[in-house]
């Protein structure tokens, strides 16, 4: 069903883009491959997936050699002592949310003589159970990040609260977009608001309506999994 799911997802993305006068090509689909075996990831790649997202460092390490060439994204909480295992494997880290992690990413990237693209994870809903920096602390955080030359901030990421009625997530996506615009208007050196990574299988349509150009979708492609 992976091909059918991807085709359906692309049609849905096109439909929602049409309603808000956006182009489907603007939307970067990150296929979330948590617990998905390499053979199924490779099938998704065969049918057009170019970017995959993993929540855990160990899964990136375990699967990396068995998966066809693809862009890897670290989308889960990242411990500082595990940065060294993925810094040479990922295209982007979506979950930068604290300074000691930034320093470690910078240090490891410098050793590899590369720059690393990151998104700032913002706890836009203020949930105590969610990782991410608060919206109020983002500007101070960005000022500190400007000192780390190997880190390229490319935008913001958030995880909205799960809601039975996905319409209830709209306010969080809207607030992240507003925050992104506020940051963009400050023209901070080395800080770019190119991407808004928000929206998952249950709420990606609303996220797109509110400005997402990266969506992280797993269940809608690979089906429900037991974690």
Image (cartoon, helix red, strand yellow):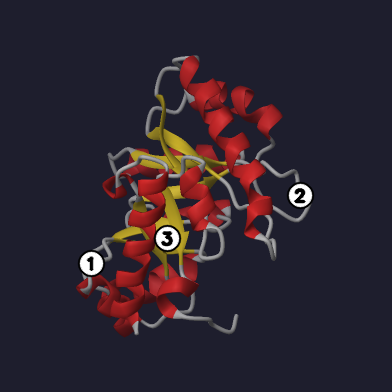
Q: Are marks 1 and 2 in contact (CB under 8 Å)?
A: no
- Element at badge 1? loop
- Between the C-alphas of marks 2 and 3, the distance is 29 Å
Q: Residue, x 35% and y 47% (percent of image)?
A: 18
Please tell me which residue lies in front, 145 or 184.
184
Q: In the rendered structure, which disc, 1 or 2, sits on the residue that comes first in sequence?
A: 1
Asked if 217 appears above or below 215 in the picture, the reply is below
Q: Nearer the viewer, residue 99 or 124?
A: 124
The image quadrant where one finds the N terminus is bottom left
Q: CA distance from mark 1 to mark 2?
A: 35 Å
- Mark in the foreground, 1 or 3: 1
Q: Please indicate whether residue 162 sits to the left or right of residue 143 in the image.
A: right
Q: Residues within 10 Å of mark 3 (few under 14, many from 20)?
A: some
Against 5, is 85 above or below? above
Residue 221 visible to the viewer? yes
Q: What residue does disc 1 label? A: 48
SS class of the residue under badge 2? loop
Residue 127's disc number? 2
Side of 58 relative to 25 (left or right): right
Seen from the viewer's position, the closer of residues 32 and 178 is 178
Residue 57 horizontal/vertical position (percent): 48, 65
Q: Residue at x 47, y 40 (%)?
A: 211
**Mark 3 sits on what residue?**
85
- In the image, what residue occupies the spot 62% across and 35% down? 175
Furthest residue toward right: 128
Crowding at dot 2, Cα within 10 Å, few <14 / some 14-19 / many 20+, comes out as few
How packed mark 1 is, by other alpha carbons closer than 10 Å (few <14, some 14-19, many 20 or more), is few
Nearer mark to the viewer, of 1 and 2: 1
Labels 2 and 3: the sequence-earlier one: 3
Can you tell which mark lies on residue 78? none
Residue at x 48% of width, y 16% of height: 185
Q: Position of residue 32 (x, y in %)?
A: 44, 67
């Amino acid at each position: 069903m992976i091909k059918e799911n991807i085709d359906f997802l692309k049609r849905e993305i096109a439909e929602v883009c049409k309603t808000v006068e956006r182009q489907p090509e603007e939307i970067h689909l990150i296929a979330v491959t948590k617990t998905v075996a390499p053979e199924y990831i490779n099938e998704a790649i065969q049918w057009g997936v170019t970017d995959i997202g993993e929540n855990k460092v160990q899964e990136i390490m375990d699967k990396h050699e068995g998966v066809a060439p693809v862009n890897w994204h670290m989308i889960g909480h990242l411990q500082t002592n595990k940065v060294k295992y993925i810094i040479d494997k990922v295209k982007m880290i979506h979950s930068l949310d604290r300074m000691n992690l930034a320093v470690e990413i910078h240090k490891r990237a410098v050793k590899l003589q590369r720059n690393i693209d990151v998104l700032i994870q913002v706890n836009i809903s203020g949930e105590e159970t969610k990782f991410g920096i608060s919206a109020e602390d983002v500007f101070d955080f960005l000022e500190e990040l400007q000192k780390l030359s190997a880190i390229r901030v490319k935008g913001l990421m958030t995880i909205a609260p799960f809601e039975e009625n996905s319409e209830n997530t709209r306010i969080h996506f809207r607030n992240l977009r507003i925050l992104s615009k506020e940051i963009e208007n400050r023209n901070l050196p080395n800080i770019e608001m190119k991407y808004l990574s928000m929206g998952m299988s249950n709420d990606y349509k609303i996220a797109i309506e509110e400005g997402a150009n990266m969506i992280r979708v797993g269940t809608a492609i690979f089906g429900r999994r037991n974690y």
